[in-house]
Image: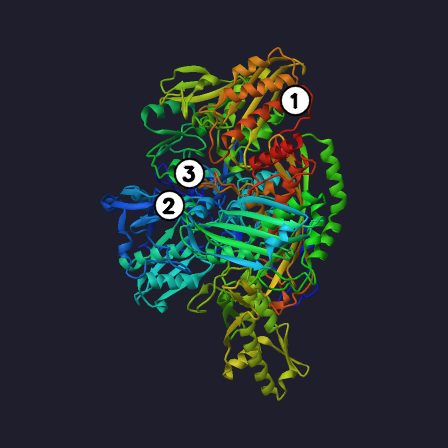
């Protein structure tokens, strides 16, 4: 469904929603980068969940249109009610929030999605809502003001009516297979062993839009009920592989302040609405933000084959080399199990990048210490960006356990850290700076653990 | 965050229906927010449309040994493939000098340089086909940095100097000498709409080109030249751009030329839209500069002489680099008086993409040297940098620039003192010094910097503009002018000018596409001069028609001309009012010409390139900014916590638009100086080639406390509505952020040392500046 009209879509698997919309006359949605980095292509996608309509902002440039079956896609052309502008549109005009206008439809849609979700009129909320929207003209002040004004208005949505969904069809089984449960997923994998799995598509679709590769068929794991759930036992949480970062933010809101702060710097709102924890692991990137966190949390991955065979892999054992993992072609990640005890320990997650929001880390550091603040009884330390794989530093951990945290220990650890890692120089940072950051991160975590310095939760907290 | 109502300085002061001086919305604002604003890629595609992609050089410098395009021809969807030998006219598409080839011939000079072009039935197939080429190269030595170019004396154009007095003697006899070097990186424009052109063949053997260009006349001229046809066979049109910033001044023409060539060859419509990565790799950017300076100062830090070496990385050809390095030289003083000076400007030729115009046009690269020098001087003599800046400002009697123009309007002292008072600089400075004493890792920095930016094209002939105004029989008004709309609100301001001149309501006036067949031989919309030039031309056209109407009404009612006025949509003669619409109908019936052209050329300006002396600028636009930052000493990460700006736009034609330019320019400048790092690897490949690794600011990078005030003083020169240009100058206000970061780093050396810091000040760069300060302290 697009702008309240049900449409029949029969497109190749790798046809993006943006390409489809623009080819069908909806040119208000723009291509700025075709890589999910600028947000000019943002549309609102509504889904019926438990009888209620929920909207989210997504980058239409990297979403296969076939993934949107059964959903309501609202574009900038579909916001105004007849000739009456939507409150976001009214405020964007009143606040002079557009200059060249090319990014404007994307901002309008990101802000409109916030209005649909009933987000509060707070500056941080607005900033997060538009974290995936780049504007090169205005300097943002006027756009944030427009967002604040719009969110402060009384708003009754006409788009929240579940009746819109009455004529939509269940997910498709065409070029984009959309199994609804694990057994259907395995069936699809058996039937199409060559097909790639896609969840959020925030990485995979760059193969199409940036490297001009083709995918004849995709198997979408984002509708698989079991993979979308978070379950809890007495001792563990099990997070389904298709749980998105936005869902993680909500689930961990009161469970891990450190993770939530980190997630605010992972991608943008649009990326977090689509990207999944399973995808962050499966793509094997050495600089993904979640693996160091999961190593610290002592997570176990549950893998399952198309034949239904399940196995468990310690997250430390998952990576075998640069962009290589133990995941076989006939396997998928089902879930990630985290012991609850990890949440009572002292943890620090640090991300280093040039830009605070929506930037890939140059170094990602995660530390977990148990103990009384004087002496460490257990430690887990992991870094991303310092080697070909996410790296757990057992040698350093061993140096810390049983020791008093003091200046001497810091110096010893700092020296050892240098030897334990082999970072590269690339577009994001020099090897020297990466090494220095790893030392700074560990030093800060230890100082905060021992109470020498006050907690400073990454650059986000540099408000003072 | 400043309330919107503060913007509306002009509202109520001059609230005539024309909207002159009011904060009217951008004339496309509603179209922007509803998706109705049409960009080139949004135009309904003709059924026969072809799409273009180019095959690119994979080495920085070499000779093409063999080029086999057989597989490209045979690739799916391919309709036509061209190389430079297929160009019927002149393949050189340089804007000023020579050397910018449409497609490479025997030699390739940068990675990404187009060698051949493909037209296919879709952009994806065109891109895929390009990968099928087989090209063999013979490698030649590549020059990649300004230092290498200086060593090899590899220049695109000769070196120039501004010389004033005996600088060597002045520096040698000074109480103190400061000396430093500074690498200032370039900047990717990152206009949200990438480069694009659509070419439609005409029956006259020419083309109608619709492009996203700041310079439709140059597009027209170069397309004609490439096709080998007369200029009048090419119509070039630009409705709007999704951002330009200088990046579509000369760079847009290549796409238009290739699309047009395919259009003529195949008698089909052709679109050439660059995907983002191609755009980032294949089009020019802001120049990297390597600057060195040496200054002699008194005990109080007052400059007695300055020697500067400004080396701009121009890339493989001259493009617009003559004027860009000139402008860096013109602004090497920023706002400060140099009693003796020698400014040398080098135009380094390197095997990288040819760099081009970008908001500020070299100016920022000169200014940053001056501001870096001010910080160094303050540390050297142990004074607050603000006091050093104030004492070095131009003043009556200390008013001659290194290029001979005298500064006539001394506004900056008052502006700096006013901002320092309003934003409480002195108390905040004390509080920050105290804060920094108490904190080991977290440090704050503060800087108040001025800008003085010269307005006019430094190529004098470009300072001309035209307009075409029609009034139709229903009283509606249509204006065309030579300027292009790239988001800066030019069309809105022009409509305000026309309405105000004619004494009618703003709503009557429509501005439409910029077209070379309506207003010919136009200058680029650049140098901040869009409103200054085209506003005056539009006013000139409006005055002509107004005069005709007045004379008509006067003769009609037996009055004298000076007894007729037009105001608020009414024509008043001897106390009797007639509706404007009625007068227009009557004028038409009486065969009064209701169409006029307007023209303008900027007075007073001249410059002798040989002697480096003259009066290149009609006037200067001024501004001051105060920025505060907080820095993490362990990582170099930082936040900009507060920014206060006071900026000089003369009489504002539209305060909301002007404030939008100031805020947007500032944030764009802040990006250049903080997170945006243009990087090449040692083979000459651009590695910051996508928004995934080249980071322009997001809303989170903009401080919550961000105040912009307009300094209300009419321009003393006769400009449109006594306003001042506003496009480029605010970008350089962001130098205050860079200086504040350096100030915070200097706190680690108790302000006794000026740590070296290049630009952009990424967290990494700040970390190393802090490390240098810590090391100084520990010695």
From this viewpoint, is residue B417 visible? yes
Tell me which chain the residue with mark 3 is part of: B
Mark 2 Cα shell of 10 Å, populated few (<14), some (14-19), many (≥20)? many
Of tags 1 and 3, which is closer to the observer? 3
**Disc 1 is attached to a residue of which chain?**
A
- Which image quadrant for residue B536? bottom right
**Do the residues at discs 2 and 1 belong to one chain?**
no
User: Marks 3/2: CA distance?
Assistant: 15 Å
Q: Which mark is residue B682?
A: 3
Q: Dot 3: what SS? A: loop
Q: Is residue A283 above or below residue A160?
A: above
Badge 3: few (under 14), some or many (20 or more) residues near its Cα, within 10 Å? Answer: few
Closer to the chain start, of discs 3 and 2, is 2
Instruction: Kindly check if marks 1 and 3 are in contact, taking CB atoms under 8 A apart as contact.
Output: no
Distance Cα–Cα, label 2 vs label 1: 48 Å
The x and y percentages for residue A197 are 39, 28
The chain that hosts pointer 2 is B
Q: Is residue B603 above or below residue B728?
A: below
Q: Nearer the viewer, residue B359 or B483?
A: B359
Q: Which mark is residue A447?
A: 1
Q: Quadrant of the C terminus of chain B?
A: top right
Looking at the rendering, which quadrant does residue B653 occupy? bottom right
**In-image side of B420 versus B222 (left or right):** right
Q: Tell me where residue A335 appears, x and y as whole percent.
A: 47, 21
The residue under label 2 is B112
Question: Taking B401 as reference, is A277 left or right?
Answer: left
Q: For mark 1, give the secondary structure.
A: helix
């Amino acid at each position: 469904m697009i702008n309240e009209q049900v449409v029949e879509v029969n497109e190749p698997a790798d046809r993006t929603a943006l390409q489809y919309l623009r080819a069908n006359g909806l040119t208000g949605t723009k291509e700025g980068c075709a890589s999910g980095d600028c947000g000019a292509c943002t549309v609102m996608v509504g889904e019926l969940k438990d009888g209620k309509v929920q909207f989210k902002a997504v980058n239409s440039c990297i979403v296969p249109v076939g993934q949107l079956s059964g959903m309501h896609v609202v574009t900038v052309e579909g916001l105004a009610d007849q000739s009456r502008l939507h409150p976001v549109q009214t405020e964007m005009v009143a606040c002079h929030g557009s200059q060249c206008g090319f990014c404007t439809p994307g901002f309008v849609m990101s802000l409109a999605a916030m209005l649909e979700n009933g987000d509060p009129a707070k500056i941080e909320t607005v900033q997060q809502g538009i974290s995936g929207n780049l504007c090169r003209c205005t300097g943002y002040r006027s756009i944030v003001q427009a967002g604040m004004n719009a969110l402060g208005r009384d708003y009754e949505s006409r788009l929240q009516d579940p009746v819109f969904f009455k004529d939509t069809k269940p997910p498709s089984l065409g070029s984009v297979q959309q199994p609804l449960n694990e057994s259907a997923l395995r069936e699809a994998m058996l039937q199409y062993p060559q097909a790639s799995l896609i969840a959020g598509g925030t990485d995979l679709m760059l193969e199409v839009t940036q490297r001009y590769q083709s995918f004849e068929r995709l198997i979408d794991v984002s509708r698989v009920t079991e993979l979308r759930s978070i379950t809890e036992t007495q001792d563990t949480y099990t997070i389904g592989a298709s749980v998105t970062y936005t869902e993680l933010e909500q689930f961990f809101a009161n469970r891990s302040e450190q993770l939530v702060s980190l997630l605010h710097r992972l991608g943008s709102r649009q990326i977090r609405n689509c990207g999944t924890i399973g995808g962050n692991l499966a793509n094997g990137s050495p600089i993904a933000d979640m693996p160091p966190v999961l190593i610290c949390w002592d997570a176990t991955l549950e893998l399952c084959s198309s034949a239904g065979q399940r196995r468990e892999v310690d997250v430390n054992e998952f990576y075998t080399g640069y962009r290589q993992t133990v995941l076989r072609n006939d396997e998928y990640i089902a879930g990630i199990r985290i012991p609850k005890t990890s949440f009572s320990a002292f943890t620090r997650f640090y991300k280093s990048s040039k830009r605070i929001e929506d930037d890939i880390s140059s170094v990602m550091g995660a530390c977990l210490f148990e103990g009384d603040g004087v002496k460490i009884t257990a430690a887990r330390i992991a870094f991303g960006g310092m080697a070909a794989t996410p790296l757990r530093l057992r040698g350093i951990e061993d140096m810390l356990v049983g020791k008093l945290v003091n200046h001497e220990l810091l110096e010893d650890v700092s020296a050892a850290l240098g030897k334990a890692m082999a970072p590269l120089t690339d577009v994001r940072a020099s090897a020297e700076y990466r090494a220095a950051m790893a030392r700074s991160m560990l030093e800060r975590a230890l100082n905060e653990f021992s109470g020498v310095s006050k907690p400073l939760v990454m650059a986000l907290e540099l408000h003072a | 965050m400043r309330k919107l109502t503060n913007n509306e300085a002009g509202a109520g002061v001059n609230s005539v229906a024309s909207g002159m001086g009011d904060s009217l919305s951008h004339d496309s604002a509603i179209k922007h927010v509803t998706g109705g604003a049409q960009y080139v890629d949004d135009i309904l595609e003709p059924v026969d449309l072809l799409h273009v992609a180019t095959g690119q050089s994979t080495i920085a410098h070499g000779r093409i040994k063999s080029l086999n395009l057989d597989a490209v021809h045979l690739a799916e969807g391919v309709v036509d493939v061209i190389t430079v030998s297929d160009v019927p006219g002149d393949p050189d598409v340089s804007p000023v000098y020579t050397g910018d080839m449409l497609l490479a011939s025997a030699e390739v000079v940068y990675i990404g340089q187009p060698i051949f072009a493909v037209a296919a039935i879709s952009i994806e197939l065109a891109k895929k086909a390009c990968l099928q080429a087989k090209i063999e190269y013979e490698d030649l030595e590549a020059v990649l940095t300004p230092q290498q170019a200086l060593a090899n004396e590899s220049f695109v154009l000769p070196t120039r100097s501004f010389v004033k007095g005996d600088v060597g003697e002045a520096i040698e006899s000074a109480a103190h000498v400061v000396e430093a070097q500074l690498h200032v990186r370039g900047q990717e424009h990152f206009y949200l709409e990438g480069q694009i052109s659509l070419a439609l063949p005409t029956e006259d053997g020419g083309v109608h080109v619709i492009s996203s260009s700041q310079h439709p006349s140059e597009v027209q001229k170069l397309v004609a030249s490439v096709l080998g046809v007369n200029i009048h066979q090419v119509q070039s049109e630009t409705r709007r751009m999704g951002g330009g910033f200088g990046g579509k001044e000369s760079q847009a023409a290549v796409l238009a030329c290739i699309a047009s060539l395919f259009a003529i060859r195949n008698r089909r419509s052709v679109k050439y839209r660059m995907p983002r990565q191609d755009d980032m790799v294949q089009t020019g950017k802001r120049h990297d500069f390597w600057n060195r300076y040496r200054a002699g100062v008194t005990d109080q830090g007052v400059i007695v002489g300055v020697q500067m070496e400004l080396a701009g990385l121009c890339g493989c050809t001259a493009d617009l680099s003559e004027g860009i390095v000139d402008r860096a030289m013109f602004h090497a003083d920023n706002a400060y008086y140099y009693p003796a000076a020698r400014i040398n400007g080098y135009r380094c030729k390197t095997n990288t993409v040819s760099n081009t115009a970008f908001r500020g046009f070299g100016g920022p690269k000169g200014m940053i040297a001056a501001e870096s020098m001010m910080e160094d001087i303050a540390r050297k003599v142990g004074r607050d940098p603000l006091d050093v800046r104030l004492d070095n400002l131009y003043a009556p009697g200390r008013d001659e620039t290194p290029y001979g123009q005298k500064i006539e309007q001394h506004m900056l002292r008052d502006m700096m003192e006013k901002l320092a008072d309003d934003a409480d600089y002195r108390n905040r400075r004390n509080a920050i010094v105290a804060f920094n004493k108490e904190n080991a890792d977290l440090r704050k920095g503060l800087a108040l910097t001025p800008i003085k930016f010269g307005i006019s094209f430094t190529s004098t002939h470009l300072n001309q503009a035209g307009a075409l105004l029609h009034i139709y029989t229903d009283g509606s008004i249509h204006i065309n002018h030579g300027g292009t709309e790239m988001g800066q609100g030019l069309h809105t301001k022009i409509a305000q000018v026309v309405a105000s001149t004619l004494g009618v309501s703003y709503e009557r006036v429509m501005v439409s596409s910029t077209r070379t067949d309506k207003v010919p031989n136009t200058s680029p919309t650049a140098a901040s001069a869009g409103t200054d030039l085209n506003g005056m031309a539009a006013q000139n056209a409006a005055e002509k028609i107004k005069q005709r109407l007045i004379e008509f009404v006067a003769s009609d009612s037996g009055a004298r001309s000076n007894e007729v006025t037009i105001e608020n949509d009414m024509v008043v003669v001897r106390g009797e009012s007639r509706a404007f619409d009625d007068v227009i109908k009557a004028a038409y019936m009486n065969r009064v010409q209701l169409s006029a052209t307007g023209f303008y050329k900027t007075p007073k300006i001249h410059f002798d390139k040989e002697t480096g002396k003259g009066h290149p600028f009609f006037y200067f636009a001024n501004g001051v900014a105060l920025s505060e930052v907080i820095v993490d000493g362990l990582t170099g990460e930082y936040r900009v916590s507060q920014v206060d700006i006071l900026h000089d736009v003369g009489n504002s034609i539209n305060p909301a638009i002007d404030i939008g330019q100031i805020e947007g320019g500032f944030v764009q400048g802040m990006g250049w100086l903080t997170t945006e790092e243009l990087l090449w690897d040692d083979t000459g490949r651009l590695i910051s080639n996508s928004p995934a690794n080249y980071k322009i600011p997001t809303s989170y990078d903009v401080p919550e406390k961000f105040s912009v005030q307009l300094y209300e003083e009419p321009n003393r020169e006769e400009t449109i509505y006594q306003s001042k240009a506003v496009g480029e100058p605010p970008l350089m206000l962001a130098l205050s952020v860079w200086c504040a970061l350096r100030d915070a780093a200097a706190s680690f050396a108790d302000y006794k040392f000026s740590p070296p810091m290049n630009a952009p000040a990424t967290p990494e760069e700040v970390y190393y500046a802090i490390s240098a300060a810590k090391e100084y302290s520990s010695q």
